[in-house]
Image (cartoon, helix red, strand yellow):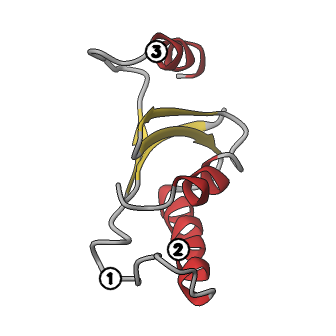
Amino acid sequence: MMKTYLITVPSNMDESIISSIIKKYHKWAQISPSAYLVQSNKKAAEIRNDILNVFAKVNEDSVPGKDDLSAESTMLLVIRVTSEWATSCVDKEVTKWMHDNM
């Protein structure tokens, strides 16, 4: 069974970059502009490293307007989520996803 992870990403990160990372996972849901749920067989550290590799690639390509790899621009959290959860003011599609997948 796949594990579910909560991923938070820098709020100033380009949405298209974040989407390209998150959409690689078979099942995912966007909770807020900078928070996502994904399902994966990977460990949290592997997911973190995958995301940091994309951040590094963006910086390497010197895309205008992109932040450098400072601590603030790469601050992220990847944490495994259990089946026990509660929400408030979260979109119904997201809570349905959570109910169906967690």
* Residue closest to the eye, 32 or 39: 32
Q: CA distance from mark 1 to mark 2?
A: 11 Å
> What SS does tag 2 mark?
helix
Work out whether 29 lies above or below 58.
above
Image spot of residue 23 (x, y percent): 68, 46
Q: CA distance from mark 2 to mark 3?
A: 29 Å
Q: Specify the label residue 70 is tagged with.
A: 1
Give amino acid for label 1.
Ser
Residue plotted at (65% across, 47% down): 41
Image spot of residue 14 (x, y percent): 50, 60
Q: Residues within 10 Å of mark 3 (few under 14, many from 20)?
A: some
Residue plotted at (66% across, 32% down): 1
Of callouts 1 and 2, which one flags the residue occurring earlier in the amino acid sequence? 2
Dot 2 corresponds to which residue? 55
* Residue closest to the eye, 41 or 19: 19
Q: CA distance from mark 3 to mark 1?
A: 33 Å
Mark 3 or mark 1, whichever is nearer to me? 1
Mark 2 or mark 3, whichever is nearer to me? 2
| Residue, far front | 64
Q: Quadrant of residue 40?
A: top right
Q: Is 44 on the left-hand or right-hand side of 73?
A: right
Q: Circles 3 and 1: CB distance less than 8 Å?
A: no
Residue plotted at (59% across, 67% down): 50
Dot 3 corresponds to which residue? 95
Give amino acid for label 2.
Phe
Of callouts 3 and 1, which one flags the residue occurring earlier in the amino acid sequence? 1
> What SS does tag 3 mark?
helix
Q: Specify the label residue 92 is tagged with.
A: none
Give amino acid for label 3.
Thr
* Residue closest to the eye, 47 or 60: 60
